[in-house]
Amino acid sequence: MYESLTIGQLSTRSGVAPSALRYYERLGLIRAERTGGNQRRYARTELRRVAFVRISQQVGISLEEIREALDSLPASRVPTAEDWARLSATWRERLDEKIRLMTKLRDDLDGCIGCGCLSLQRCTLNNPGDSLAGEGPGARLVQPRAAGVSPS
Amino acid sequence: MYESLTIGQLSTRSGVAPSALRYYERLGLIRAERTGGNQRRYARTELRRVAFVRISQQVGISLEEIREALDSLPASRVPTAEDWARLSATWRERLDEKIRLMTKLRDDLDGCIGCGCLSLQRCTLNNPGDSLAGEGPGARLVQPRAAGVSPS
DNA sequence: CCTTGAGTTGAAGTTGACTTCAGCTTGCAG
DNA sequence: CTGCAAGCTGAAGTCAACTTCAACTCAAGG
C-alpha cells in the first residue's frame, strides 16, 4: 500500500482508464507486478511513464513510437530526471514542426480567405502559373495526407 | 470534356484517391452527375469543394463537421468567393485554438524538460501544492483525451 | 469490332487506440 | 465469514477515414 498502486488508483491518479492501462501494458508501455491473486500492482514510477505517454500523445506521437522511446530508457535503474528530460527533448522538435506547419496553414488560409479562392496551390504552393484548367500531371491540391491536427 | 471531369481526372487534380472521392460522395461532401453508362462526371466547381475538404482536414475538422459546413453553402447557386471565405473563416478560430494549445504544450514541456519532472500537473497545471502522494480525488495528469496533433 | 484502361458496386478489410462484454476471481470492510 | 466492489482474461466491438477486392461494365483508340 505504500510502494504500489492498484490499477484503479493509477487510473484515478493518471486520468487514464483501467482498460487503457491494460492496453498500454500489452503494448509494453508500462509494467506491473502481480499480487498472489494475479492483480496488478504498479510502482509509483509507472505514474511518470503514463504521464510521458499522455504528453507524447498530445505531441502527436503514436503509441508505437512512444514505446520505442521508452525502450531507450535504462532498464537497470529507475530513470532519473535527466533521462526523462532527454526523452521529452526529442519530442520538442516534432512539436515545433507541427506548430510551424499549422502556422503556415493558418497564414495560407488567411491569404485564401481574402480572395476566397481556396486553391492553396495557386495562392501559396508551387506551380505558380498553372490555372486549374491547365494540362499535365496537374498540381496536387494541398498536402497529400498528413500534418493535420487531431480530432479535438 | 470541357465542363466535366472524370473521377480519375478529379483525383489527379486534387491529389485525392478515387476511392476517397467515392467515399466523400457517400458522405455527401461532393456530388457528381452521371453519364448514360453510370460513370461520374464532376463539375469543375467540385474541385473547390475537394480543396475545402482537404484544407479543413488539415485544420483537424472531421468529415462529418465538414459536411455540415458544406451544407450551409447556398444550394441554388454556385458558391462565390465570399461564400468560401466565410466558410474558411470559421475554421480560422479552430486553427488558432489548436496552435495556442500546442504552443502551451511546448512551453510546458520546456519547463518540464528543465526539471525532468514530467508531471505537468505539478509544473503548470492547477493543484499547486499537491504532491503525487497526496490523498483525495487526485489531480488528473495532463489532458484527458484531446487537443493533440494528428499522426504525421 | 476488339481490346484495354478506366470506372462501377457492395462488402469486407485496415489501422490505431481503445472500450465493452461475459464469465470468473480477489480482497477488504463489516 | 460473507458480500460485493474491484480486478482478471480473451475476444469482440467501435470509430473515422479510407482502401481493397471481386466481379462486372464503359469508353475510346486502332
Image (cartoon, coloured by chain):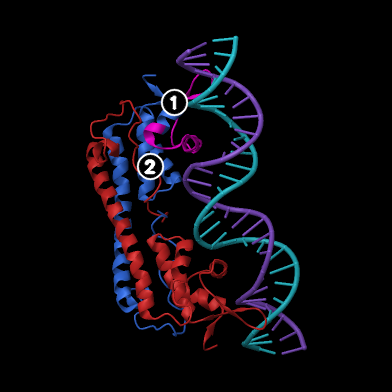
Chain colours: A red, B blue, C cyan, D purple
| Element under disc 1 | loop
Q: Amino acid at mark 1?
A: Thr
In the rendered image, the vertical position of residue B113 relative to residue A124, given as above or below: below
Rendered location of residue A73, percent (x, y): 44, 74
Instruction: Determine the chain carrying the residue at label 1.
Output: B
Q: Amino acid at mark 2?
A: Arg
The earlier-in-sequence mark between 1 and 2 is 1
Which image quadrant: the N terminus of chain B? Answer: top left
> Which residue in the structure is indicated by mark 2?
B54
Q: Residue at x 45, y 45 (%)?
A: B64
Q: Judge by depth and name the residue closer to the eye, A91 or B135.
A: A91
Task: Say which mark, if any, is on residue B6.
Answer: 1
Instruction: Determine the chain carrying the residue at label 2.
Output: B
Residue A6 quadrant: bottom right
- Left or right position of B24 against C24: left
Q: Residue at x 41, y 55 (%)?
A: B150
Rendered location of residue A142, percent (x, y): 34, 41
Residue B5 seen: yes
Q: Residue at x 34, y 60 (%)?
A: A94
Gap in angstroms between the C-alphas marked 1 and 2: 19 Å
Rendered location of residue A4, percent (x, y): 53, 84
| Element under disc 2 | helix
Residue B117 seen: no
Read off the magenta span.
B12-40
* Residue B95 magenta: no
Task: Say which mark, if any, is on residue B119.
Answer: none
* Residue B38 magenta: yes
